[in-house]
């Protein structure tokens, strides 16, 4: 769940940061340009003030044909002063500037560089035309850092007696402004990255805090499903809803354990209580058989059914004890234990004409030796029971990853696919094998014995025919049944 929840939170936080970062980046770029535009407006206003004196001194327009010699001298001096200011401005800042008359065919009042002129169209011409109507030019289009040839054009009118007689135009390069914008964006990017790292760390802590009780609950559910009914969830940590869920789960587990305990107790008590009357009944049947003719089929059938009922009761009692007893786990040599059980069954196998083969190298695992021996006895007994004379039962031990496996493969008729899903159920037996003695509880007892110690049992086809039963026990030390929340 964390692999799905964490990316979702990260994407949402990244979206929020980007939603904040983009407007902030645009604001930084706009502020840098606005600062440049304001500076250019101040510059054009100063040049317009100087140009106004030049214009005033001409007395009769651009040519100044009717001015006196003194007036012409003053005008020339002021024009030279304006030209020097424009040249110095261009030399220091690299900003092209000029004061152009309404009639662009007339030589300008001043400009720097001398090649600077107003073209017939474009941004510079639009700013010039707007200034002719005694309006300051509109804010120029935003120049972005990747626009290497972007320019900022600002124009201001030169007014004399209420009329616009000339226009001051500045054409600024944007390299410095774009560099400052990039630096501002870099600061924003670093801040966004730092915020993203903090957000990821917060998301990790948040998802861990939320999902830790879920993981504990999942692990505890698995423990209970595999037979460790004492497992419980410590109702601590996480959101209040999950803490309530943990408490409810523990209550449910307590109730389930109580019900199962009552069921096991009933089965054990019933089996124990029925054994004595059944033993007395079998004894009376045997005494009665002495009064009947030898070889009476009815009395023999009654005795066989009575003995079968006694075996069922014994198996029921063993199953109840197996499900109730706690496992005494020890680090055990599984190979040695399996070889010992194979030797114990060898005489039985030889009496049936079945070859019992063992391949049991040394391999350790955590198991209850008594319970594992009993489970292995039930599996080998089942294999010998269904294997015909002349066939083979092979017991193999091998370590594989985190578990040690004992495989018991027989040469019997095997089971169909749908029957494999039911094997190990209580009292279940294949319809094709009803004539073979058994209660249908042996493998159920094996599963109960193994589950109590953290082991497992599985079934598969054995080629070319037969059944393969695999008993697994863990190779690592068991963890405590109770889990922290």
Image: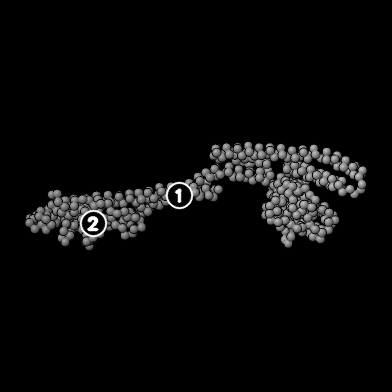
Name the residue at 73% across, 54% down: 469
Specify whether residue 278 is in view: yes
Query: Which circle's residue, 1 or 2, is located before the other in the chain?
Result: 1
Above or below, comparing residue 72 to residue 255 in the picture: below
Name the residue rendered at 84%, 54% in the picture.
348
Residue at position x 23%, y 55% in the image: 127
Residue toward you, 482 or 55: 482
Residue at horizontal 77 percent and vertical 52 percent from the top? 434
**Left or right relative to 344: residue 400:** left
Seen from the viewer's position, the closer of residues 262 and 55 is 262
Between the residue at mark 1 and the residue at mark 2, the CA separation in whole angstroms equals 42 Å
How is the protein colored in the picture?
A: one colour
20 left or right of 132 in image = right
Report which residue position mark 2 lands on: 126
Q: Position of residue 156 (x, y in %)?
A: 21, 52
Q: Badge 1: few (under 14), some or many (20 or more) residues near its Cα, within 10 Å?
A: some
* Residue to which mark 1 is pinned: 14
| Left or right position of 131 against 295 | left
């Amino acid at each position: 769940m964390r692999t799905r929840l964490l990316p979702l939170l990260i994407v949402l936080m990244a979206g929020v940061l980007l939603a904040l970062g983009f407007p902030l980046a645009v604001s930084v770029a706009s502020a840098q340009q606005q600062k440049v535009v304001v500076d250019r407006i101040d510059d054009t206003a100063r040049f317009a003030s100087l140009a106004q004196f030049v214009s005033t001194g001409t007395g009769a327009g651009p040519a100044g044909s009717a001015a006196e010699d003194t007036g012409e001298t003053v005008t020339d001096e002021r024009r030279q002063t304006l030209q020097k200011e424009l040249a110095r401005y261009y030399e220091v800042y690299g900003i092209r500037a000029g004061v152009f008359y309404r009639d662009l065919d007339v030589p300008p009042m001043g400009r720097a560089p001398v090649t600077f002129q107003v073209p017939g169209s474009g941004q510079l011409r639009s700013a010039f035309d707007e200034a002719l109507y005694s309006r300051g030019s509109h804010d120029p289009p935003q120049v972005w850092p990747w626009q290497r040839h972007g320019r900022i054009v600002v124009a201001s009118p030169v007014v004399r007696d209420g009329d616009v007689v000339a226009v001051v135009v500045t054409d600024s390069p944007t390299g410095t402004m774009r560099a400052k914008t990039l630096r501002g964006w870099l600061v924003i990017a670093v801040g966004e990255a730092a915020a993203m790292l903090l957000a990821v760390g917060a998301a990790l802590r948040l998802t861990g805090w939320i999902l830790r009780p879920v993981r504990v609950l999942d692990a505890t559910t698995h423990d209970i499903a595999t037979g460790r009914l004492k497992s419980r969830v410590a109702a601590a940590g996480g959101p209040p809803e999950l803490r309530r869920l943990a408490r409810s789960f523990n209550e449910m587990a307590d109730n389930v354990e109580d019900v199962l305990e009552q069921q096991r107790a009933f089965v054990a008590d019933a089996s124990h209580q029925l054994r004595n009357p059944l033993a007395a009944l079998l004894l009376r049947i045997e005494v009665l058989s002495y009064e009947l003719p030898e070889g009476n089929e009815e009395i023999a059938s009654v005795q066989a059914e009575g003995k079968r009922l006694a075996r069922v009761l014994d198996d029921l009692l063993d199953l109840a004890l197996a499900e109730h007893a706690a496992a005494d786990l020890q680090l055990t040599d599984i190979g040695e234990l399996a070889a010992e059980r194979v030797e114990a069954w060898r005489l039985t196998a030889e009496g049936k004409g079945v070859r019992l083969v063992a391949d049991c190298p040394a391999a350790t695992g955590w198991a209850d030796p008594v319970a594992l021996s009993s489970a292995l006895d039930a599996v080998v007994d089942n294999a010998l029971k269904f294997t015909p004379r002349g066939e083979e039962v092979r017991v193999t031990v091998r370590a594989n990853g985190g578990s040690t496996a004992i495989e018991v493969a027989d040469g019997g008729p095997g089971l169909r696919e749908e029957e494999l899903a039911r094997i190990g159920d209580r009292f279940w037996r294949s319809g094709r094998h009803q004539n073979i003695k058994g209660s249908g509880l042996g493998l159920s007892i094996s599963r109960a014995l193994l589950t109590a110690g953290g082991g497992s049992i599985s079934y598969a086809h054995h080629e070319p025919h037969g059944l393969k039963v695999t008993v697994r026990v863990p190779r690592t030390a068991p963890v405590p049944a109770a889990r922290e929340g």
